Image (tube, rainbow, N blue to C red):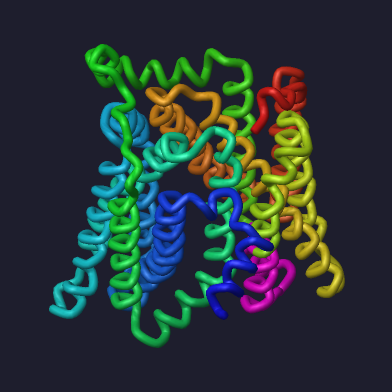
Amino acid sequence: MSVRLLSRLKARYPVQGLWRHPDFLKLWTGQSVSLFGSLLTRFALPLLAALVLRAGPAQMALLAAAEVAPGLVLGFIAGVWADRVRRRPLMIAADVGRAIALVSIPVAAALGTLRIEQLYLVAMLVSVCGVFFDVAYPAYLPTLLRRADLVEGNSKLVSSEALAEVSGWSIAGILVQAAGAPLAILVDAATFVVSAISLGSIRARESLAASQHERRYGMAREVAQGLRFVAADRVRRTLAAAGALDTLFGNALGALITLYLARDLHLAPVVMGAIYAVGGVSAFVGSLVVPRIARRWPLGRILLGSMLLYTLGAFTVPLASGPAALAIALLVGGQCLDAAHTIHSVTKLSFFQRTTPDPMQGRLHATLRVVEGAATLAGLALGGILGQSLGVRATLFVVCAGKLLGPLLLAHPAVRQLRDDESL
């Protein structure tokens, strides 16, 4: 009877899309677990340095720099390697490397030998492995999926990121409070093992991206090829520049938003957390609707309209003032537009994957990563400098106005008029 009922349910509600793709489901499962684990370390590592090792401001800054710097130094090299070798083994090696590096922290803590220098080293090693993984990952997806399935695949992966943002911080806080930061980091190491196992269980064969002729060019020339690939095409160049501007001013805003919410608006941490959680829910909703939007609207309109929406939403931060209820309502309204950010990110990434030859995928994503990494550091510096000289709220208005440069670039006909035959 149960078999017959199951057959009827399958006939009435057939499994569609990538739910029928076992290799993608393995990839998605492993990465979803890994995303939650990574949030644990992002939360626990600074706490471990500050509370257990009594790190000072300079040491905390060095720890943060150790997590960022490898991306700028090694980004281009990672891109070349992602195009020279098979990407799945590279990703597995990166996961194993991160797991081994992280395990050393709870081991040292148990032995009573943990020092701040070890945290610097572990942060750098995890970041180095992360650079290679994060460049190889979007380059690998087009070899696993058909081009027509890339939007659905990217949207499912982004939905996991959104869910991790909603619940991951709370889980991390509970785990650190109950078991301590070293054990939380050990859990993260285990999630990278899960990710490596899920990648290793994928059955689809992967061909080598680069030919021997291309590999004879040398590292510097291959990096230059990736840069030219982005810079020579008007659409790719415009998308990269708009993304860099959005990242620059977005991080300038991010550098000051906590100060503004806490000191100017006097919001309690629990209220701020609830507001940010609304953004995570909105991003999750965006990940669910983006495949339908991609089928219904031309690519250029999606890219421009979505960026314009979430850019306008940023103005709710400096506009939030007066009675607490009004300020919170404005901030929640701005967070609701995070769905547009997800739609833009998934559509742009899928477009790059679809329109880039496989031997160039790694270098394309490495170039974009390095550009946005440099914009991130510049934005943090810009926010600090302007905040010190203009004041926090005035700076927030300035950087929100600066974010409008991104949609202004995307209004160029080369992007705005991209049609359905070039969309996904």
Q: Which residues are magenta?
A: 257-280
> Is residue 124 visible from the viewing direction of this image?
no
Where is residue 239, by image quadrant? top right
Residue 210: x, y in percent? 31, 22
Q: On the rendered image, what quadrant is the N terminus found in?
A: bottom right
Residue 261: x, y in percent? 69, 66
Residue in front for this viewpoint, 206 or 71? 206
* Residue reaching furthest to the bottom: 178
Residue drawn at (29%, 46%), measured in percent from left and top? 128
Residue 181: x, y in percent? 34, 76
Residue 260 colored magenta?
A: yes
Query: Does residue 55 lie above or below 58 as drawn?
Result: below
Q: Main secondary structure of the magenta part?
A: helix
Residue drawn at (39%, 59%), measured in percent from left and top? 30
Where is residue 336, by image quadrant? bottom right
Query: Does residue 114 lie above or below 192 as drawn?
Result: below
Residue in front for this viewpoint, 282 or 23? 23
Q: How many numbered discs?
A: 0
User: Is residue 144 found left or right of 394 in the rendered image?
Assistant: left
Residue 347 colored magenta?
A: no
Query: Does residue 270 lie above or below 139 as drawn?
Result: below
Residue in front for this viewpoint, 142 or 6? 6
Query: Does residue 260 lie above or below 134 as drawn?
Result: below
> Is residue 418 visible from the viewing direction of this image?
yes
User: Is residue 327 found left or right of 93 in the rendered image?
Assistant: right
Residue drawn at (17%, 72%), measured in percent from left and top? 108
Residue 248: x, y in percent? 59, 39
Q: On the rendered image, what quadrant is the C terminus found in?
A: top right
User: Is residue 339 found left or right of 133 in the rendered image?
Assistant: right
Residue drawn at (26%, 31%), measured in percent from left and top? 85
